Every structure is written in structure tokens, then in C-alpha cells.
Amino acid sequence: MAPFRTCSAIPKWSAPIPARAWEAPEMNSATASVPVEPRWSDMPGLLACEDLVAGYTGDIDILRGLSVKAWPGRISCVVGPNGTGKSTLLKSLFGFLRPSAGRVLLGTRDITGSPPFRMLGLGVAYLPQRPSLFPHLSVEANLKLGLWHARPRKQVLAERLDSAYQRFPVIREKRSQPAGQLSGGQQRQVEIARSLLADPSVYLIDEPTAGVDPQTSETIYDIVQGLARDLSKAVLLVDQDIRAALAITDYVYVVKNGTVFSEGERDDFGTDTDALVARWLYASGE
């Protein structure tokens, strides 16, 4: 198995998340002589949903009892055929859709149905699949919107902007340009940098490389990996590019018809992606 890539393109202002209930439990005296590697699936996530049911109309459910977790310092990836509820899951977690059943937890706090502006204040960031920048505003103006809810002092804002510019040179070079003039990959980097200004603990990321060229896609995957490895963020990633996503992920959920069809740690699927692709195809009935 290839080693994880490291990412140096991440701002360093964030301190590691303190240890809390999601850490691996200590072994007691009865089990101390037989070390057992804890499985992440048995531990509480920093962000989790339990038996989530949600949809866009009252009589049609897209999510049908779906449960996933995201842990600090790790990447959980949700894969599956189109139309199985992957994007709906992220929208439900972030408050764009209110679940009709189930619950969303941040640590031990029930945040089910919290609106998006409150989710951001709670430390949850959402990067949608479609572009979310204001194309006629400058790159810097778009970045500043990442802290609109916090109303920081000018000095704090300036420091965080400077950190973003240091770590994303392409943003510094184009900070005065309208965001709509940037390439798809450059816009994606602006979106990630914008979310980093708020220093969230959890990232919900939908198709981060959709419409992006292969070379830039590799850069974006490095950045996403760095969110977990370097900054101890909990990342829940939705992706269609199974092979690229599996190279950086820790835990995989295969979704079918709004439920989890199969799940496991990345190593459970072996050193290549064949087993995971097979499960995906079986889930879709192809």
C-alpha cells in the first residue's frame, strides 16, 4: 500500500483538537496482556448521523435510515452510484434539508435540523459540488465571506488572509481578480481557503475535483488529506472518483438506495480498489 501523501499547502494557525470522548478507550487490567487494535467504527465520531431519513418531498425519502461517522484527523468517504443519496446526506447534515427521522450529533450534542449559519458557527464547514463563489466579486472579497458570521477584528482577518495567501500562492496572485475569471481548480482552492479562515473542526466535502483537470485534482486531494493529517480536522468526503478517494481515505461507506450497503476501514478492502469497485457495482445492480 502506498504511503499517505503529506500536504504543505495548509494554513498552520489551527491548533490540534483536544482529546475527548472519541479517543480509543484504554485497556483495563483484564485485557492489558492482549492488546487489541481498536476499530474506528466502534468509536463515537466528532460528527455522526444515526438512522437519518430525509428527502425533498414529503412522500419520497432519499435517505432511508443512513448512519455515518467522521472522526478527527481522519477522512470518511461516502461512495456509491449516482442518485443514492450522497449529496443529500451532506445537505441534511449541514441543515439545508431537515431530516424527518434520525438525528445528527456533534460530539454528544444533538444538532439535528440546525440551519446552515448555525452549523458554521458550531465549527462545521460545507463545500458543495457546484461552485459557491460570487463570480463578480474579487477573490479577496470571497475569502472574507468565510468569516462573515464571526465579525473578527481587522487584525485577525488580516492575519488569516495572509496565512491563506502564503499557503495558496495562486490565490495571492489573483486576489484582486473577479473569482469568476479563475479556472475550476483555482476556484476550488479559493473555496477551501475561505472555509479555513473560520477554522472549522469538521469538513463536509462534495465531489472536490468535479470538472477539474487531473493535475489540479491531485493538488486538491493533497489539500483535503492535509485537512485531516496536518490539522486534525474530521472530513466527510463524497466522491465519484473511487480510486483517487481511496488513496487518501481511512474509512469507507458504500451507499445503496439511501442506506449503507457496505462499510469498513480502507485496509479492509485490500491494497487496491478492486474490492471496493466490485461492491459499488453490486450495490448499483450493474
Image (spheres, grey):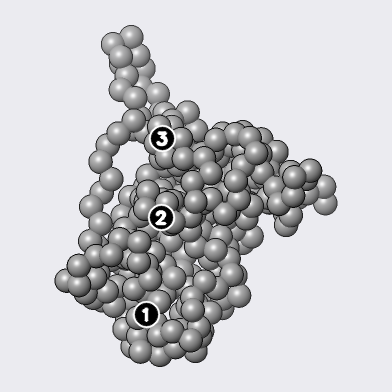
Task: State the residue at coordinates (17%, 71%).
Answer: 155
Which residue is labeled 1 in the image? Answer: 141
Instruction: Determine the secondary structure under disc 2.
Output: helix
Ranked by sequence position, the earlier of labels 2 and 1 is 2
Relative placement, left or right, of 206 versus 170 is right
Q: What's the amino acid at mark 2?
A: Leu
Q: Is residue 114 among the parts visible in the rendering? A: yes
Residue 201: x percent and y percent? 36, 50
Which residue is labeled 3 in the image? Answer: 109
Q: What's the amino acid at mark 3?
A: Arg
Residue 87: x percent and y percent? 62, 55
Compared with residue 138, is residue 71 higher up or lower down, i.e. above or below?
above
Q: Nearer the viewer, residue 189 or 277?
A: 189
Q: Is residue 282 among the parts visible in the rendering? A: no
Ranked by sequence position, the earlier of labels 3 and 2 is 3
Q: Nearer the viewer, residue 198 or 270?
A: 198
